[in-house]
Amino acid sequence: MSEHSQLEVKNLHVGFQKKKTFTTILNGVDFSVEKGETLCIVGESGCGKSLTSLSVMGLLPKTGKVTEGQILFDGEDLTEKSQKQMSKIRGNDISMIFQEPMTSLNPVHTVGKQIAEVVQLHEKISKKKAMEKAVDMLKLVGIPSPEQRVYSYPHELSGGMRQRVMIAMALACNPKLLIADEPTTALDVTIQAQILDLMNSLKNDFDMSIVMITHDLGVVSEVADKVLVMYAGKVVEYSDVKSLFNNPQHPYTKGLIESIPKLTEETEELPIIPGSVPNPDNMPRGCRFATRCPHAQPTCFNEVPPLIETESNHKASCWMFDQRWEEIKKEGEAYASRKETAATTEPVRN
Amino acid sequence: MQAEKKPQQQQNLLEIKGLKKYFPVGGGSFFKKDNTYVKAVDDVSFYVKQGETLGIVGESGCGKSTMGRAILQLQTPTEGEVLFEGQDISKFKPKQLRELRKDIQIIFQDPFGSLNQRMTVGAMLSEIVRVHRIVPRSEELTYVQKLLKDVGLNPEHYWRYPHEFSGGQRQRVSIARALAVQPKLIICDEAVSALDVSVQAQVLNLLQKLKRKYNLTYIFISHDLSVVKHISDRVGVMYLGKLVELSDKHGIYKEPQHPYTQALFSAIPDVSVQEKKERMMLKGDVPSPLNVPSGCRFHTRCPLATEQCKQEIPEFRETKDGHKVACHLV
């Protein structure tokens, strides 16, 4: 099975060493990306979506560590590779685009030189050839008059152009997998539409897989084949894109989709998810969404729900889809009524 | 250009006539000043009625934030009038301006940058109340705590510092700070843009609740079209320092008339996957405000541009009842 997947992440646990305590941020992340497929990872800030991508790239900060699980790329486990091996894979087989094109481009070199550098690092070709390749790449990503633009510095380009340069650089070595971390968040909508279009067409040309990280569900519906919804370091829903938007299963996903103001509908008040994301040092024992969930039962607070398949290609991590849910609900009711009777019959002692 | 005609009712809280804000840019020698300007806001006119929400949308660099600041006189307008309750506040003296701040407040995008990190929330809010003499000293604590409750925080948050709050809570503190002086008009400059969707929804609901409760008027500046649609009564679209379209939200979202507005709306990724709509894709980038195109500023990217668009500046005129567009083709 793993032979078909471009990338397969199994039971990934990542955490950070903070003085004497070790805080686990990612708690068992599972997903796979097939060849030529786009997977979107969505979630709110702090849910671990960027950390997932950094783990795949092997770019975790020094205090971070993969404690458990496997990252299989073409069937090889990336967590067991050395730094040297990883830097060969990075840029060559797996590339990454970041949110802020200004901070990830070197301001003192021309963009042509920066693209050529990538090419030269991974392929044995002359400087001149590499520069030609840079021009080709800029043409490919739709930068007008690329022959002149290769001599531009990043500050001379607009935000959309810079992001195009980043894409050109990432694709310079025909990677099999492109990881894009919020590639359009810093851009205006009209430019965002251009970039998303570009990425979609390039994906087909290069026949690569894309892992796109975003918080914008609108972007997800535009580009994704499959979607991974994360909440507080855990996967809550994993589904193909149609099924997710037509029939969201997990209460968190439902709440998330409902809370976006819609252009086509008119509502006086937006439906909201009450409360806020729990602190990673102090996670609930059971389902992490239980504290904000409208359907939560005592079991939800105590036991971690498994990822349950609700329809084909659609999994959600919620007790509601377990066979035991009726039981759990009954237990919850019994618990509530016990609490009530206890409160009424037994007055406070102190 | 042309000032907006005053409607019959005398309930315009704010009226802006031909507002311009130019920033001089360096260049030229020490002795000879070079007269190049960035025309951040160029001849904008509109009015805001008491109790309504005017949304202003546009891409980055279109001058929407500068306009907000120019209204508040945080930046002195180069030209034009800003009439608040009939008085031209652009001619106000500093002392008068200080009084004015009680009536107009602003909420910024980044709540962390705009809150004093060394003061507790309570101290910060009490200071405002004290400086503007909103309530007697003895009632300060109860007043501020009521304020915190109004914005959905606990009275205990009085003794906390900004860094102890989450992003959404910090934005609530910013809202409390704006509310502390009991203003009539609040300018929300990208107030929910930095927040996650679920928190954004909470803050938007809060803003609407407060509007009803205190009969507030908002100018809501944002780049997010769906948020603006949700909260506004009327919406203005800006492009390179000019208003290109202004209408009540039903008009503008159902039948956008300006080609830029149409392109802007079609570029929004929609959450529904069922039908992929035909995109009206704009080519190229927004031109530099230093070197604004002649004629209609949008003609360089407009798919419908004609020779006339390159030569003449289109007039901002009413096409339908209350629907204004600046385009030759409409």
Image: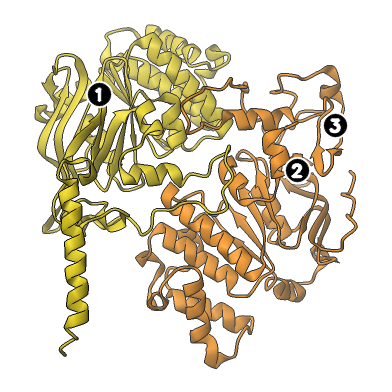
Q: Amino acid at mark 2?
A: Ser
Question: Spatial distance from mark 2 to mark 3, Cα to Cα?
Answer: 20 Å
Q: Quadrant of residue A53?
A: top left
Residue that badge 2 annotates = B247
Question: Spatial distance from mark 1 to mark 3, Cα to Cα?
Answer: 51 Å
Residue that badge 1 annotates = A90
Q: Amino acid at mark 1?
A: Arg
Instruction: Report whether residue A184 is seen.
Output: no
Quadrant for the N terminus of chain A, please: top left
Tell me the mark number nearer the camera, choosing from 2 and 3: 2
Label 1 CA crowd tier, 10 Å (few <14, some 14–19, many 20+): some
Residue that badge 3 annotates = B313
Shown colour of chain B: orange
Q: Amino acid at mark 3?
A: Ile
For this orientation, the residue located farthest to the bottom is B138
Which residue shows up at 21% across the image and 78% down it? A343
Q: Is residue A205 above or below residue B252?
A: above
| SS at mark 1 in the image | loop
| SS at mark 2 in the image | strand
Quadrant for the C terminus of chain A, please: bottom left
Label 3 CA crowd tier, 10 Å (few <14, some 14–19, many 20+): some
The chain letter under disc 3 is: B
Contact (CB < 8 A) between labels 2 and 1? Answer: no
Residue A299, horizontal then vertical, whole percent: 16, 55
Residue B213, horizontal then vertical, whole percent: 61, 69
Say whether mark 3 and mark 1 are on the same chain.
no
Q: Quadrant of residue B263?
A: top right
